Image: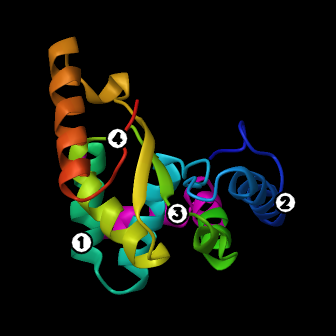
Amino acid sequence: NDEDFWCGTTDEYLRLLLTARKAFRDVSPATYVADGGIQGAALNWLVVDYYLSTGQATSAIAFYEVFTGTLISVADLTALNSTWQTKQPVVRGRELYDSMLFSYCDRVNFHYYQLAGGIPDVVAHLSRRTGTRLMSNEVGIKEKYAASPDDAARQMVQKYARALALGVAPVIW
């Protein structure tokens, strides 16, 4: 999650997860263990960065446009992707991937508040990077992405339907 919710290092979080996992499994071996959840904005920039770093600029632009609803050029997206505000979440996300944290989870958890169209790319990215089943314990809609309460409700239904159709379970808000 973002630094408002976790201020420690990746190694400290991994130790916390392993301690909690052992405690749960000692009591109930069938208990599923998930991480606290990757923040949606960070996850979006991890996907953009992946596409740009693998020469898939067209996919990066298409993904950016579906998760923000904003048109952007390759040059502008590349410049935006190199700013500190976007690089910091990418670096922290890569640290999580490299820490092997997700190999100790039965589910990889993510949070998603952006437009529903980005969910397929997010799910594909997380599945590719972690090889673990996915869940989401935070699915919502930011006010700036909804034209009205009815639009927000429609988008929420779309998000749930897309996530569930892609095998994400559970999906909770």
**Distance CA(mark 4)–CA(mark 1):** 17 Å
Q: Quadrant of residue 68?
A: top left
Query: Position of 21 compared to 106: left or right?
Result: right
Q: Earlier in the sequence, mark 1 or mark 3?
A: 1
- Image marks 4 and 1: residues in contact by CB distance under 8 Å: no
Residue occupying image coordinates x 66% and y 69%:
101
Cα distance, mark 1 to mark 3? 29 Å
- The residue that disc 4 covers is 114
Query: What residue is pinned by disc 2?
Result: 12
- 23, 94: nearer the viewer: 23
Residue at image location 41% in from the left, 64% down from the top? 133
Q: Is residue 99 above or below residue 152?
A: below
* Residue 115 visible in the current orientation: yes
- Dot in front, 2 or 3: 3
**Of discs 3 and 4, which sits in the foreground?**
3
Whether label 3 touches label 4, CB < 8 Å: no
Q: Residues within 10 Å of mark 4 (few under 14, many from 20)?
A: many
Hey, what amino acid is under mark 1?
Ser
State how far apart marks 2 and 3 are (Cα).
Answer: 19 Å
Relative depth, front residue between 156 and 25: 25
* Residue type at tag 2: Glu
User: How far is disc 4 from disc 2 in space, using C-alphas?
Assistant: 29 Å
The tag earlier along the polypeptide, 4 or 2, is 2
The disc, 2 or 3, on the residue closer to the chain's N-terminal end is 2
Residue of label 1:
59
Query: Type of residue at label 3?
Result: Asp
Q: Position of residue 23 (x, y in %)?
A: 78, 53
Name the residue located 32 percent from the left edge and 54 percent from the top edge.
168
Which of the two marks, 1 or 3, is nearer to us in this view? 3
Disc 3 marks which residue?
A: 106
